[in-house]
Image (cartoon, grey):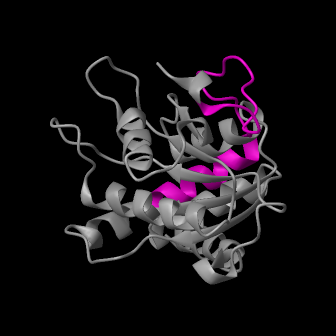
Amino acid sequence: MTVVFGINAYVKHIASTLIITPDKSESPSEVDCILVLGCGVYEDGSPCPMLEDRLKRAVELYNSGVAPKIIMSGDHGQEFYDEVNVMKNYATNRGIPAEDVFMDHAGFSTYESVYRAKEIFCAKRIVVVTQQYHLYRALYIANCLGLEAKGVSSDYRAYAGQSYRDAREIAARCKDFLTCVLKPEPEFMGDIIPVSGNGNTTAG
């Protein structure tokens, strides 16, 4: 247990300096994109509260000029479960041009989302958006993979089951600590789609 808590503390320590408030975010010339990490969606096509808040924060950051593009990275591994189109629709329904919103259909884990942002979407400088408990791990991964990353929290409210989520995240940080040592490729890679281009090329 000492090793587990030591790794957890180390990951949080490394990532804590990379978490910023929205007003401290860089300008578009310094950031390639906002990376929104996926979460659950309901059968009616609406995002769960945690995902809704991540999307709300991303829209705010885009509208304030933090980055010119957004990557919506989530699970679209099954025909009848699709996080990324729900995520893109949320943004475009709030006035963000469709060509500025990219969909990563194979963001099946935090590690894969960050890895693919760099290797598939050719991002070098990113702002990651998720809840703060999750930001530590995402930013640690980004740092290990050589991305220039900052993170902005999307905690607009309290979430049911957060105590369980916090406990589970300790194990996830330890797992991804090891993953970042080994640096495996994600299960799915695919064609290069530079985030500097047109997000409509990721439709599907």
Which quadrant of the view contains residue 7? Answer: bottom right
Q: Is residue 189 magenta?
A: yes
Which quadrant of the view contains residue 17? Answer: bottom right
Give the left or right position of residue 138, taking residue 26 as reference: left
Foreground: 71 or 153? 71
- Boundaries of the magenta span: 171-199
Give the left or right position of residue 166, taking residue 125 as reference: left
Residue drawn at 25 percent across, 53 percent down: 48
Tell me if residue 155 comes above or below residue 144 in the rendering: below
Residue 184 point in image, percent of width and height: 70, 33
Residue 53 point in image, percent of width and height: 36, 64
Residue 108 point in image, percent of width and height: 48, 35
Residue drawn at 54 percent across, 43 percent down: 97
Give the left or right position of residue 160, taking residue 197 as reference: left
Which quadrant of the view contains residue 126? Answer: bottom right
Residue drawn at 27 percent across, 66 percent down: 164
Tell me if residue 20 comes above or below residue 61 in the rendering: below
Give the left or right position of residue 61, taking residue 87 as reference: right
Tell me if residue 199 comes above or below residue 164 in the rendering: above
Q: Is residue 96 magenta?
A: no
Q: Is residue 3 visible?
A: no
Residue 49 point in image, percent of width and height: 26, 60
Q: Is residue 24 visible?
A: yes
Foreground: 72 or 91? 91
Could you tell me how many numbered marks the image carries? 0
Residue drawn at 67 percent across, 65 percent down: 65
